[in-house]
Image: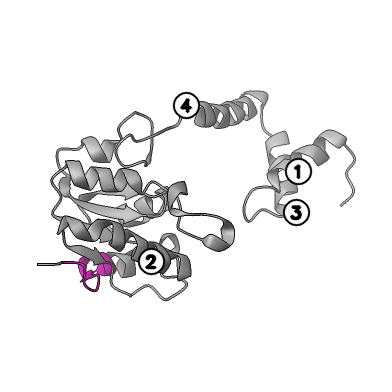
Amino acid sequence: MNFSSQLLEDAVNEFSKLPGVGQKTALRLVLHLLSKEQEEVSHFGNTLIRLKEEIKHCNICHNISDHQTCSICTSVKREKETICVVEDTRDVMAIENTNQFFGVYHVLGGLISPMDGVGPSDLFIDSLVQRVATRPVKEIILALSANMEGDTTLFYLHKRLKDFQIPITTIARGIAFGGELEYADEITLGRSIITRVPYEGSFIK
């Protein structure tokens, strides 16, 4: 792609680094910004800078938040004794959109993936174990994507949590294998939460 301006090319190159954004889309976005007033573009840029500088992660569940503790963890309406374990913030948003879950979350920050060099120590697993050990918990729901990395993480979490004698469930496999929670439609995901099933051998009497 030939550019008439180095500044234009640099901006397009930066936008094209975003997931799912090719050079043509990046060029369209950059030209759109160029057509806007200086104040609008400045506001756009400052919003991104503030996001990076001021965003926090909840000190309980690790979800993205404006405060040290997120609004879900502080809400008196949530069932604090039911913890839904998810991969990242996108999954929290997907489950919240179903309006079928009223507990709290624990965001792992990824899935175990030896091929990508991601091990248990790279995720917020120890803090989950500590949370279960120090707070009253009635159920742990493992709501992870139905793929190899998700199943590997499920198996590892079960090993770490089974001695607490707490029921461990997984969402029903209404989600096709290889599917990710954030792309599931709200009805399917909502039903998967409601019809969750015990993880095999998870509750030891």
**Left or right: where does residue 43 sit relative to residue 189?**
right
Asked if labels 3 and 4 touch by Cβ distance under 8 angstroms, the answer is no
Q: Is residue 156 visible?
A: yes
Most extreme residue toward the left, as rendered? 205
* Mark 4 neighbour density, 10 Å: few (under 14) some (14–19) many (20 or more): few
For label 1, the residue is 12
Percent of width and height locating residue 136 = 13, 46
The residue mark sitting in front, 4 or 3, is 4
Dot 4: element: helix
For label 3, the residue is 24
The residue mark sitting in front, 1 or 4, is 4
Marks 2/3: CA–CA distance: 29 Å
Residue ID at (29%, 62%)? 158
Report if residue 187 lies within the magenta region: no
Viewport quadrant of the C terminus? bottom left
The magenta segment is 191-203
